[in-house]
Amino acid sequence: MNIRILGAHALESTTTQFVSILVDGVLALDAGGLTQKLSLQEQEKIKAVLLTHSHADHIEGLAGLAMHAFLSNITIEVYAIADTITALTTHVFNSVIHPNFTRMPSPDKPALRFHTIKPNRTQNINDYSIFAFPVRHSVPSVGYQVTDQEGKSILYTGDTGPGLPSCWESISPSLLIVDCAVSDRWISGAPALGHMTPGLLKPELVKFRQGKGYLPPVVLVHMVPMLDEEKEIAKEAAQIAQELNTTIKLGYEGMEIDI
């Protein structure tokens, strides 16, 4: 399984993109920075997109991908919980903000086709086993475990605050990709915004190890790349990695991981 981090940050710039992760070149997890780092040929290989929630920084690239699909007369299958689909079809792909690609070029063969995914159930999507689980954020949100046919798997939380251990018993990933937006200087306010800090993440990882008997490598995403936040996150994460005797790395645009 090849994991490619297309976007790893909470802000866009010449060097940072909104969060988007590409699995084996065909399955996208969130669409924040989905198209900015892919050639047109690479975009055409994407078969499905899994969205965690409806916030703009996680769906921004979907509009560009939809236009490409429309012009290429192909259909992109998009999976999300019902709240996310309602938000997108009501407020984004509504012929006011963006063309209604869910009915163009025709209702039978649209550029985008939405599918409702239900939490706490396993679903087969493009030969991957997908398990969606609820996370704590400011809008209804889910994370995903993605498992390939060889049994290799990753877990991506999307935006989340503390409370992940409720899903640990249902998953067994080889890699954790976890939201860690800000440093511990924001530890008191981050949960209300639905985000993690390194200090908030540590007890989650401890509970994972206690329950599963192992702790996979961890990649942090959704960092705020300003006010020295990323440097502080890196320092705090390194300390936690040492204390837990594990690997914790900050994700970055262009990062590739093979598991």
Image (cartoon, rainbow, N blue to C red):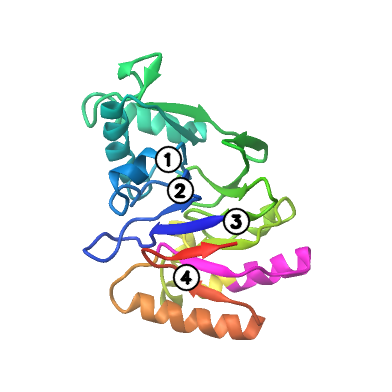
Secondary structure under the numbered disc 4 in the rendered image = loop
Instruction: Between label 2 and label 4, give the one nearer the viewer.
Output: 2
Q: Which residues are magenta?
A: 202-222
Q: Residue 46: which disc?
A: 1
Q: Residue shown at 54%/52% (left/top)? A: 136
Residue 138 drawn at (x, y percent): 45, 49
| On-image quarter of the C terminus | bottom right
* Side of 90 relative to 210 (left or right): left
Residue 213 as seen in the image, left or right of residue 195: right
Q: Which residue matches tag 2?
A: 25
In primary-sequence order, the first of circles 1 and 2 is 2
Mark 2 neighbour density, 10 Å: few (under 14) some (14–19) many (20 or more): some
Real-space Cα separation, disc 1 to disc 2, in angstroms: 6 Å
Determine whether 245 is above or below 214 in the image. below
The nearer-to-camera label among 2 and 3 is 2
Most extreme residue toward the front, as rendered?
41
Q: Position of residue 246 (x, y in %)?
A: 63, 78
Name which residue lies at 65% across and 80% down: 244
Horizontal side of 221 relative to 127 (left or right) equals left
* Amino acid type indicated by mark 4: Ser
Q: Is residue 53 magenta?
A: no
Instruction: Tell me the amino acid under the disc marked 2.
Output: Gly
Say which residue label 4 marks: 188
Please state which amino acid type lies under the numbered disc 3. Answer: Ile
N-term-proximal mark, 4 vs 1: 1
Q: Secondary structure at mark 1?
A: loop
Disc 4 versus disc 1: distance between alpha carbons? 39 Å
- Seen at 26% across and 32% down, the residue is 67
Which callout, 3 or 4, points at the residue further toward the start of the chain?
3
Left or right, 258 with reference to 233? right
Q: Helix or strand or loop: what does disc 2 sit on?
A: loop
